[in-house]
Amino acid sequence: MSGVAAGLRVLDFTWYGVGPITTKYLADNGAEVVKIESMARPDGLRLASPWKDGVAGVNRSQLFANYNSSKKSITIDMSTEPGRKIARALVPHFDIVADSFTAGTMDEWGFGYEQLSADDPSLIQLSTCMQGQTGPHSRYPGFGNQMASISGFYYSGYSEKEIAPPQGPYTDFIAPKFACFALLCAIDHRRRTGEGQFIDLSQYEAALHFLAPAVTDYFATGTVLRPEGNRSRRYSPHGAYRCADEGAEERWIAIAVQNDAEWQSLLRILGSWPGPEELALHCDRLDRFVELDEYVQDRIGNLVALELVAALQSAGVAAYPVQNCLDLRGDENLHEFGFWPWLDQTECGPMPYDGMAYRFDRTPGVLSAAPNIGEHTEEILGEVLGLSSGEIANLVNEGTLF
Amino acid sequence: MEDPRTAPRGGPLASYRVLDLTDDRGAMCGKMFADAGADVVKIEHPNGCPTRRIPPFLDGIPGRDRGLYHLTYNAGKRSVTLDLERPEARRLFLRLVETSDFLVESFSVGYFDSLGLDYESLSRSNPRLIYLTITPFGDRGPAARYKSTDIISWASGGMMYLSGIPGRPPLQMSLPQAGLHAGAEAAVAGMLAHLERERSSEGQRVVIDTQACVVWTMLSESPYPLLHGDVLRRSGVKSGGQRVSRTLVYPCNDGHVMFLLTGGAYSHSAEQIVEWMEEEGAAPDWIKAVDFSTWSPEKFSTDLSDEFVRLVGECEDVVTDFFSRFSRQEIYRVALERGLMIAPVATVEDIAVDEQLAAREYFQTAWNEALDRELTYVGPFAKLSAAPLARVASAPQLGQDNEVVLGEELGLRSEELQYLYATSVI
């Protein structure tokens, strides 16, 4: 096995978004990440669209596949005593145990850190839930949409009266970076000291790092961050502007004019500013953002988005089309970065994946397909615990491995 | 009492040094290393890093130590000034590279190379160096040298198209943060490369693609055209994705709450809301008879019957009326008591007084010398039991560590430092 994380073994109880995206970083780089699922309680994303060929099925969810590339899956029914016994026997063979259940779940199963590390002080365990393992809201259940709302990202939109939250469970894509970084810190600490540890990652506390300036400002001055649409405090003009439609499809581009020279370049392309003053100075433009938005919109409404972006960029003005998902699939920059691999899944064939947003020049990671549910039960329990095919078949029949 | 500026800050990465040459396209990387206790040295132009000039400023007063972005994302770092366009500065920089474990830069693609500070050159000074390059569009595609800012990244990565109200412009995030995603991704990738370095003793170059980081903020929406033949669109306060559209953000009497009416395995919240309405005398008889257990999430993609669509709309109208009686915190209180998946659309004010964060002693304070004032910061992003993250420390003043880093560590004499300062090298 190659890859920067080769040799690491992760027993992965996580499901849905944050946990699986966290362990995916390790799996895609050669760690052996073994998901514990069961048919009674599969990773919930296995039941969510998009589906291969638009057809639902427990091994056909692209959403699941995308967050679980390069992993293995075994089925153990953790609600049964024999199931927990088997999972417990696996633990000493792994460096890391991870879960993303509501706080308390692992402890109730006898899988809390004190319980698991008693005879293995080098164990690293990550538990991530919405609001952390302790505190009055620790057991509040939910998903990333709620978390994005609680942690301030939904207070977004065109104005206070016209709220429009970011699409999706936004904080699910913030927390994994902090969770994986924390894990890697713990791995380094263990390498140097031999000591394991428990990581309590509150997705709330991690996500707030993306609103840190607003938090510090509020405590210092009482200023409350309010929705302001596409306005920038730094650049003007700044926003999304509608170009000529293509058939039924609206075409928007984003533009950000960063300084006076870029403003002059913009004027050369869009035609002169109609007002009596020049607005040659940045500070004047920041104040007049509403008029500037109108000016830009007025000049580009009939232009072709791609042509205008090319003209603006060659004049040194930051601009890009507001890309829809089809545009993304055709974006040459993402293709050049190797971002759109298709991987063969054993049950449903080629599946489109998102690639890595990073590239190691010397030791690149290599994605492999996500597992079917229970695909590796026999392999892992055979190799790690030495169970025979017959023993495994019996455990399947009695419902322990299901 | 120990001087907090020189006392060891602790943290799991305390034995590593990071050279931070980022602007807002990557400052989060060094911030995460600093939170983990690493010695993060910002290498700034003598005029100051661009992050110091990002508005808003504390009290609305501009100044290179007053920008909120600088105060928060440069917190815990040190500052050394070097004008890297000057050969004397580059010589000193190479000596710093020799003693560093990581370098992170987010200059326009090609700029750092043009100074002769490309990976190959730096790895000759330090073969163990992990060299993190943060780019807006990757380093190889046709837009690699395009100009970019935060909103450009949101547009290029597809998230913007899906955010906002139909008929209105697509929306960026509330605060600029595509660069935070890229910086955080760089921190993870840097530590991943470090895992391998401990085996091979070799560093390497790592490229981070901000556009791809933004794609990763979507709920795997990009394959819909390939798999379902759909191009998803922005849906404002409605939930996207399913064919039967539902309200996601409801007004209440002092703002908004987030709630998605659903059933099946998640019917608990809907059933409990009806029960709560009943207690308040606000539940019409017909809603008590609705069987939410049949409203599985899939039903919203498959059942397009007029009857179902109308019923969903009528239920949402009742919920809207009901929520309008309460404040967002009153609704959240009930949600917490009953385990309902309803959340306040929180403002930063709600967050500042949140009892959960208070119980976990989340927020931290640090004294800022330049401002002669204590500031409050977001707390540790994780609780590590054996090697806790470092306590927050203030952002550095411009060049405040020149004497320690260049003088004491590199051994420059006072005369040399004076000369470098007088000639604007530092």
Image: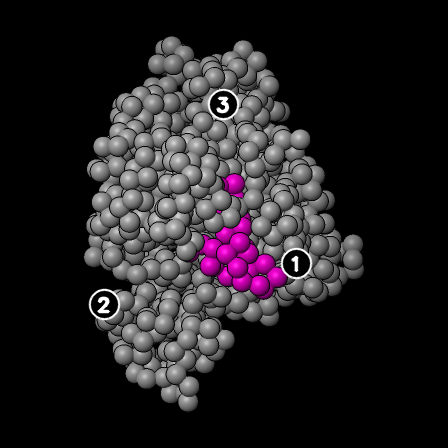
Query: Quadrant of residue B403 in the image?
Result: top left
Question: Dot 3, how many residues are within 10 Å of its Cα: few (below 14), some (14-19), or many (20+)?
Answer: many
Residue at 55% x, 17% y is A116
At numbered mark 1, what does the secondary structure look like: helix, strand or loop? helix
Which subunit holds the residue at mark 2? A
Same chain check for tags 1 and 3: yes
Q: Could you tell me if the residues under marks 3 and 2 are in contact, i.e. CB atoms within 8 Å?
A: no
Viewer-side residue, B331 vs A285: A285
**First in sequence: mark 1 or mark 3?**
3
Which residues lie in the magenta part? B50-77
Distance, label 3 to label 2, CA atoms, is: 51 Å
Q: Which of marks 1 and 3 is in front?
A: 1
Give residue B350's position: percent from left, percent from top: 67, 54
Residue at numbered disc 3: A124
Residue at numbered disc 2: A314
Query: Which amino acid type corresponds to the residue marked 2 in the rendered image?
Result: Ser
At numbered mark 3, what does the secondary structure look like: helix, strand or loop? strand
Q: Classify residue B251 as left or right of residue A180.
A: right
Residue at numbered disc 1: A221
